[in-house]
Image (spheres, rainbow, N blue to C red):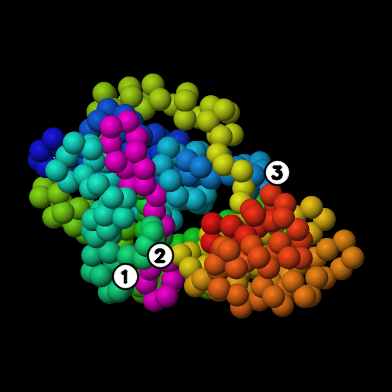
């Protein structure tokens, strides 16, 4: 595929399902392009392997918030009208298709970073998949293979509903509150950093930077062919079976790169902690007979090194499968 065959689809507001189906359909068709759009609705979007059990499904149902599982990586995210979505679809036989996932992120997040710069926000890429500015995550992204295409999907946060995201987490009340505090500390929005945001101008700048990267993009829209493909794949991507798949929860909640909240049950022991830049902090271990302060002290301030943590846990809790899982979580997954 030649660069000139890539399309730019600026689609405005779309329904929650359509906002995800559109780029999946484009990839299933093997058609390269960049999709810029917004969601008319609030919904949770799970990554390909995200555990459904990480969400409090009762809370989600009571709030009437729908769920969608995408076919690419990244974690569970809350999406709504206060975000500008960008989806990049590149056929694997294209000269622009990188071999490494790290190159995919670096290459195709460049227009987003440039757009922040034009707003006066100094943003940088932080591996594996974040864009950060002023010490805060301002954009989270996911990538993967759909059909014969590489896909990168992410959003620029205009604003964010911290309370809804924290409230939906399947955590004890005190940890949901802590997750809320961490989100407020580590996530950033354009309305925090820029005095005034014109979304139409923002999209225009972003589209221009993507055109620069691709050497030109052919303007397009929702063609009949694309709409038919969206309709064809919809039953698969909205099925109960598709939504229920995913890995077993590892007890690790990513707030931003370098910042994680851990919550695990190990038999009769409940363990919670935080990881900050590779160091274990705020450890609390509750056993059947009360706080296990010796274990807390041994873990507090420990480097997030799997073998070291496994040794500490195994010495005090034995060598069970749950202990191995806990060591994995406390070392950042």
Q: Tell me the magenta residue range.
A: 131-152
Instruction: Inspect the magenta stretch and tell me whether residue 5 lies in it.
Output: no
Residue 157 rendering spot, x and y as whole percentages: 41, 60
Residue labelled with disc 1:
123
Describe residue 145's horizontal placement relative to residue 303 as left or right. Answer: left
Instruction: Calculate the distance from the C-alpha at mark 3 to the C-alpha at mark 2.
Output: 29 Å
Asked which secondary structure carries label 3, the reply is: helix
Q: Earlier in the sequence, mark 1 or mark 3?
A: 3
Residues at circles 1 and 2 in contact by the CB criterion of under 8 Å: yes
Residue 15 rendering spot, x and y as whole percentages: 43, 38
Quadrant housing residue 197:
bottom left
Residue labelled with disc 3:
58
Q: What residue do we see at 74% from left, 71% from top?
A: 295
Quadrant housing residue 329:
bottom right
Q: What residue do we see at 23% from left, 56% from top?
A: 107
Residue 65: in sight, yes or no? no
Residues at circles 1 and 3 in contact by the CB criterion of under 8 Å: no
The N terminus lies in quadrant: top left
Q: What residue do we see at 51% from left, 71% from top?
A: 278
Residues at circles 3 and 2 in contact by the CB criterion of under 8 Å: no
Q: Residues within 10 Å of mark 3 (few under 14, many from 20)?
A: few
Magenta span: chief secondary structure: strand
Residue labelled with disc 2:
138
Instruction: Inspect the magenta stretch and tell me whether residue 137 lies in it.
Output: yes
Instruction: Calculate the distance from the C-alpha at mark 1 to the C-alpha at mark 2.
Output: 8 Å
Describe residue 221's horizontal placement relative to residue 18 as left or right. Answer: left
Residue 268: in sight, yes or no? yes
């Amino acid at each position: 595929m030649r660069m000139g065959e890539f399309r730019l689809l600026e689609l405005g507001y779309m329904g929650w399902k359509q906002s995800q189906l559109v780029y999946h359909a484009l990839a299933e068709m093997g058609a390269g392009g960049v999709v810029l759009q917004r969601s008319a609705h609030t919904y949770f979007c799970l990554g390909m392997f995200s555990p459904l059990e990480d969400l409090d499904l009762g809370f989600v149902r009571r709030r009437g918030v729908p769920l969608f599982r995408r076919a690419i990586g990244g974690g569970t995210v809350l999406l709504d009208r206060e975000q500008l979505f960008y989806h990049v679809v590149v056929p694997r036989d294209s000269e622009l298709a990188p071999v490494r996932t790290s190159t995919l992120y670096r290459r195709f997040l460049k227009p987003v970073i440039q757009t922040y710069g034009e707003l006066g926000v100094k943003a940088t890429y932080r591996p594996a998949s974040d864009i950060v500015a002023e010490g805060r995550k301002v954009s989270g992204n996911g990538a993967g293979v759909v059909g014969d295409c590489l896909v990168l999907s992410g959003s620029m946060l205009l604003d964010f509903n911290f309370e809804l995201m924290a409230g939906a987490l399947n955590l004890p009340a005190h940890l949901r509150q802590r997750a809320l505090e961490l989100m407020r500390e580590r996530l950033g929005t354009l309305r925090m950093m820029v005095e005034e945001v014109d979304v139409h101008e923002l999209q225009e700048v972003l589209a221009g930077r993507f055109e620069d990267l691709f050497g030109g993009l052919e303007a397009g829209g929702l063609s009949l062919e694309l709409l038919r493909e969206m309709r064809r794949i919809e039953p698969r991507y909205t099925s109960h079976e598709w939504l229920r798949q995913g890995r077993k929860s590892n007890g690790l909640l990513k707030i931003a790169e370098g910042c994680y909240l851990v919550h695990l049950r190990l038999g009769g022991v409940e363990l919670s902690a935080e990881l900050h830049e590779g160091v274990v902090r705020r450890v609390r271990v509750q056993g059947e007979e009360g706080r296990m302060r010796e274990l807390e002290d041994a873990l507090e301030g420990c480097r997030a090194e799997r073998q070291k943590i496994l040794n500490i846990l195994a010495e005090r809790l034995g060598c069970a499968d749950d202990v191995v899982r806990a060591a994995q979580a406390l070392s950042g997954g």
